[in-house]
Image (spheres, rainbow, N blue to C red):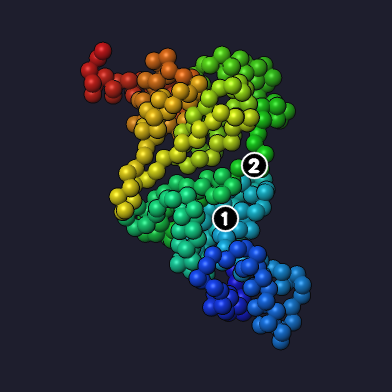
Amino acid sequence: MLDDFGQRIRDIILSEMDLSRELSDEEICDLIGSVVSREARDRPMTIKDRAELERTIFNSLRKLDVLQELVDDRDVTEIMVNGPNDIFYEKAGRIQRFKGHFSSEEKLEDVIQQIVGRHNRVVNQASPIVDTRLSDGSRVNIVLNPISIGGSAVSIRKFPEHPMSMERLVEIEALSPEVARLLQILTQAKYNIFISGGTGSGKTTFLNALSQYIPDDERIITIEDSAELQLLGAKNIVRLETRNANTDGVTPITIRDLIRTALRMRPDRIIVGECRGAEALDMLQAMTARCPPAMPIHHMISFHELRLWCFKVRISHSMRYGSR
């Protein structure tokens, strides 16, 4: 967070920026360096302190402000913002409190709008909840104040720079070589494969690893609320992403819409990032109608719960449309 001196430097930089055109990151850095040199003549400052000040100002102008330090840390796996003053992060499996905080709720909301704007998402008082992603693929969930009573909440789940492989899963004994071989056979034989588990259990990570067994000559269609899958070795791939409605009259595009569309795109395999609503019925119908093999992710904790869920979906369908 910027102190009074840093905030004054930032205000001067904003007043001197040429807003008539888009400035590059290099031009912003040059301007920051010039202003800091001029304004810090009478203020003793080490090279390290100056570099830190310039980096903090740049992050506040062009990146995610105080969150950028956590986003850049490869060892951080989760970032949790509970309003402007409370920021937590997960590192090496432990949740810790971050030393920094936003200067105000308004600054936090500026960062939120910056995040959603990069991927044509909308979040406002009329639509206060949104899922999106960062430029590196990290998953982002946002809930605005006052729905989040203590201030706007932002949850960022980062993914490893290099996706997990099945070999690595075997190496760390997450599964046995025999299970890995069985999964390879099932995948290449085009079986439907459900991936289920609780929140944070590694469903997406496992699916990314499993995708290395998909033959290179297959056409893959992925369907997600916000694109985050990192399929290993996929060449002929189309990535589809949902779209929310907004006040400009933009038509929403749902998972159900994308599943129906994917079936017309000559897929060899359909992968659904999350399947937990009305789209579950479409997915089940596609999987039981000899359509291309599917790999949907479900938020079920056990196989028994998955079977019960499938049963409820079928009963609901029968009650609505009658037995066939």
Amino acid type of disc 2?
Pro
How far is disc 2 from disc 1 in space, using C-alphas?
19 Å
Q: Where is residue 36 in the image (x, y as percent from the top left)?
A: 67, 77
From the viewer's perspective, is 1 left or right of 37?
left
Closer mark to the observer between disc 2 and disc 1: 2
From the viewer's perspective, is 24 left or right of 110?
right
Q: Residues within 10 Å of mark 1 (few under 14, many from 20)?
A: some
In depth, the one of 301 and 261 nearer the eye is: 261
Q: Position of residue 48 (x, y in %)?
A: 75, 70
Q: Residue at x 39, y 50 (%)?
A: 129
Tell me, yes or no, if residue 193 can be seen here.
yes
From the viewer's perspective, is 39 left or right of 272?
right
Question: Disc 2, disc 1: CB below 8 Å?
Answer: no
Q: Residue at x 67, y 52 (%)?
A: 73
Viewport quadrant of the N terminus: bottom right
- Image quadrant of residue 252? top left
Tell me, yes or no, if residue 94 can be seen here.
no
Circle 1 sits in a helix, a strand or a loop, which is it? strand
Q: Against 13, is 282 above or below? A: above
In depth, the one of 305 and 129 nearer the eye is: 129
Residue denoted by label 1: 88
Q: Against 239, is 132 above or below? A: below
Residue denoted by label 2: 160
Q: Position of residue 216 (x, y in %)?
A: 61, 23
